[in-house]
């Protein structure tokens, strides 16, 4: 994708459209997949394989897989297969979910630029399995952060600690080359400003890996009416830290298009994909004032 190409919003099953994008074209991929997809998953055989990094690494190519000597070309070495088998046998429900996500994450890895970063937004019930599997898939050395988005809204359980957080797992394509600029991130107020100098209090502090942030206000400016809409403030930090102006951002579970809305505000380029016509309708409204956005009908999955 070049700077003269338009920002795109594509109505399609993401698995049908992702293979049409060239390798390494996105600096940031943010994904907020639905948890229960409620459909039978079609298993994809893995085309790529992580090449062993040392003689003791058992991530050797599977028979019939593609490999490139000396570089990591993809996923699903033997070690990954073993971990995946153990985990998925343990939890049938997660098996379905991972069957849906795995081929899409493999595409995400292929589409990330060498300095690119994946943010995978998950709910607390799935985050721990996904972390173990992603460590094996991306490589443990590519794990950058586990972000906790904490909020405080809605009914509270009385029989256990009320669960009021989401988890965002962050993986980089290349641990030696990824882009991360903490100085570009909006700072936040100190919890105890009296304990720091007035200059520091005025400047604010860098966010840590725990982000307190309200949900999208039911009456606020941001509200699009899309049920699973995420706050722009969360995406803003992600886009500010992990991209530069002009970089390309991809969200292929786009929903109401929060990632694109933030990317446009910050001078980044974007491609959004969603299979739900209601999501596309919401995005048509949300992007009315953003110049040059092209809406497309993508291929359908056979
Ligand atoms: C949790 S929502 C994303 C919400 C989004 N982050 C926002 O701020 O509005 C997940 C989205 O993934 C979409 N989706 C689910 N499966 C998909 C698929 N196979 N291809 C494309 N979109 C899909 C759903 O239609 C839904 O809009």
Image (cartoon, rainbow, N blue to C red):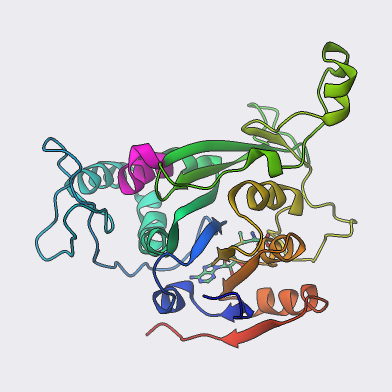
Residue at 71% across, 51% down: 236
Q: Is residue 51 magenta?
A: no
* Residue at left offset 53%, top offset 36%: 146
- The residue drawn where x is 22% and y is 49% is 81
- Toward the viewer: 46 or 245? 245
Q: Quadrant of ligand 1?
A: bottom right
Residue ID at (51%, 36%): 145
Q: How many marks?
A: 0
Residues drawn in magenta: 129-142
Quadrant housing residue 184: top right
Q: Could you tell me what secondary structure mostly forms the magenta stretch? A: helix
User: Is residue 280 shown above or below 111?
Assistant: below
Question: Horizontal placement of 233 versus 247: left or right?
Answer: right
Q: Where residue 239 appears, x then y in whole percent?
A: 65, 53
Quadrant location of residue 41? bottom left
In the image, taking residue 136 as reference, residue 222 lies left or right, namely: right
């Amino acid at each position: 994708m070049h700077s003269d190409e338009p920002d795109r919003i594509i109505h399609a099953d993401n698995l049908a459209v992702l293979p049409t994008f060239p390798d390494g074209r996105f600096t940031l991929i943010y994904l907020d997949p639905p948890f229960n997809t409620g459909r039978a998953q079609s298993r994809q055989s893995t085309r790529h394989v992580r090449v062993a990094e040392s003689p003791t690494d058992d991530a050797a190519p599977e028979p019939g897989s593609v490999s490139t000597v000396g570089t990591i070309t993809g996923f699903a070495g033997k070690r990954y297969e073993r971990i995946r088998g153990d985990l998925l046998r343990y939890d049938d429900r997660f098996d379905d979910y991972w069957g849906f996500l795995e081929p899409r994450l493999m595409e995400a890895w292929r589409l990330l630029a060498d300095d690119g970063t994946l943010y995978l937004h998950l709910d607390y019930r799935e985050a721990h399995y996904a972390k173990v599997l992603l460590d094996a898939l991306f490589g443990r050395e590519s794990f950058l952060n586990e972000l906790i988005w904490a909020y405080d809204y809605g009914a509270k359980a009385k029989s256990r600690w009320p669960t009021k957080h989401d988890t965002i797992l962050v993986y980089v394509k290349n641990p030696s080359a990824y882009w991360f600029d903490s100085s570009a991130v909006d700072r936040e107020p100190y919890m105890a400003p009296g304990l720091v100098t007035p200059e520091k209090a005025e400047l604010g502090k860098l966010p840590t890996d725990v982000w307190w942030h309200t949900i999208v206000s039911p009456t606020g400016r941001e509200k699009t009416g899309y049920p699973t809409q995420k706050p722009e403030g969360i995406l803003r930090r992600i886009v500010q830290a992990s991209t530069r102006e002009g970089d390309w951002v991809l969200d292929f579970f786009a929903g109401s298009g929060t990632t694109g809305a933030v990317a446009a505000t910050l001078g980044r380029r974007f491609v959004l994909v969603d299979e739900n016509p209601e999501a596309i309708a919401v995005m048509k409204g949300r992007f009315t004032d953003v110049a040059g956005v092209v809406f497309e009908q993508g291929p359908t999955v056979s």
